[in-house]
Image (cartoon, rainbow, N blue to C red):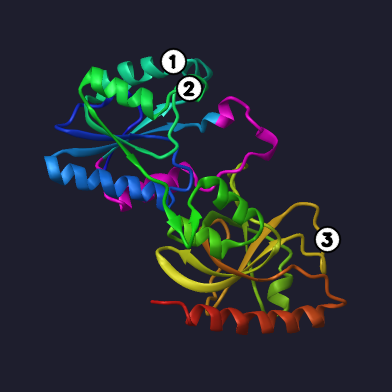
Amino acid sequence: MKVYYNINDFKPVKNAIVTVGTFDGVHLGHQAIFRRMTADAREIGGETVVVTFHPHPRLVLNIDSSNLRFITTQEKKMEIFKQTGIDNVVVIEFTKEFSRTASEVFIKDYIVDKIKPARLVVGYDHHFGKNRMGDFKLLFDLGQRYHFKVERIPALDVENIAVSSTKIRKALENGDVKKANMLLGYEYTVCGEVIHGNELGRKLGFPTANLNIPENYKVIGVSGVYACHVFYQGVKYNGMSNIGYRPTVSGNSELTTEVHIFDFDQTIYGQQLCISFVEKIREEVKFANLDELKQQLANDRITVSELLSNLPS
């Protein structure tokens, strides 16, 4: 997959099949668009081109910034683009000046002149350009004018739920990672550097890796204990993660993310670790003493081990 961080560096390809969007989460709905694009590319001997934006427009325009949370980092989006077989990605720097670009000007100056699309594939609710005024009708009219075909992919339903980034964020904010994963088509993941904690978990027989997650706007989830998979240096482990304030031992004022990795005994401070959440198993609870906490952790490990062992391979 070729990635261009300046659209002027993009060299037009034969029969470009193009889509445009921010694609937060790169969920099953987005993936349906990519599948159509790759099918189209095979049909007409073309290449797929994803045009996306960074930073996220809502960050630049300060829209609801106090509640702003994203499902995927830019790095994770790129990883999923590659996994879905996209040939080319063009990342346009989103600025306040760029946000004032009229819809027709964006299509003419950026998509038509720079990429020369044979087809433009969009989702059912796609809007674009200044104040998101551009819609499917405008795209269809511009396609007639500039000689490219426009295809609209209908909303994708999973178990009678229309897939959207908003619904996935809401599920994560409610701790329902099982539902979020169903709509994403993969396990929701956070990555960070392992930092020093108070090492109480080690004393209790359940050592944990505490994560510093650098993305201020990343959806982490709500407090609770989760069954998870853990990835370290390309190896996958089972584990149980606690998101919360550790009320029994510290009563932190800030949300922390830590994970106990099963069958793992390495010192990994300063190393990168990724946690893929599978299912929330219980709420975070304040116990009367450390013995009660230790017993609950033992019970949690049994619950998580059974849950993960019963997942389809």
Mark 2 vs 1, N-terminal side: 1
Residue occupying image coordinates x 26% and y 49%: 85
Q: Quadrant of the C terminus?
A: bottom left
Q: Quadrant of the N terminus?
A: top left
- Label 2 crowd bin: few (<14), some (14–19), many (20+), radius 10 Å: few
Residue occupying image coordinates x 24% and y 21%: 144
Residue type indicated by callout 3: Gly
Residue type indicated by callout 1: Ala
Mark 2 vs 3, N-terminal side: 2
Q: Nearer the viewer, residue 310 or 294?
A: 310
Q: Which one is closest to the eye, mark 2 or mark 1?
A: 2
Query: How far from the left and from the top, in percent, is residue 282?
Result: 69, 72
Magenta region includes residue 93: no
Residue type indicated by callout 2: Met
Q: Nearer the viewer, residue 43 or 208?
A: 43
Q: Which residues are magenta?
A: 58-87
Would residue 300 be seen by someone viewing this image from the given angle? yes
Q: Are marks 2 and 1 in contact (CB under 8 Å)?
A: yes
Q: Which one is closest to the eye, mark 3 or mark 1?
A: 1
Residue occupying image coordinates x 44% and y 51%: 27
Q: Which residue corresponds to mark 2?
A: 133
- Label 1 crowd bin: few (<14), some (14–19), many (20+), radius 10 Å: some
Q: Which residue corresponds to mark 3?
A: 251
Mark 3 vs 1, N-terminal side: 1
Horizontally, residue 89 falls left or right of residue 57, namely left
User: Does residue 185 sit above or below 296 in this rendering?
Assistant: above
- Label 3 crowd bin: few (<14), some (14–19), many (20+), radius 10 Å: few
Q: Nearer the viewer, residue 63 or 36?
A: 36
Residue occupying image coordinates x 34% and y 21%: 107
Q: Which residue corresponds to mark 1?
A: 102
Query: How far from the left and from the top, in percent, is residue 91?
Result: 38, 31
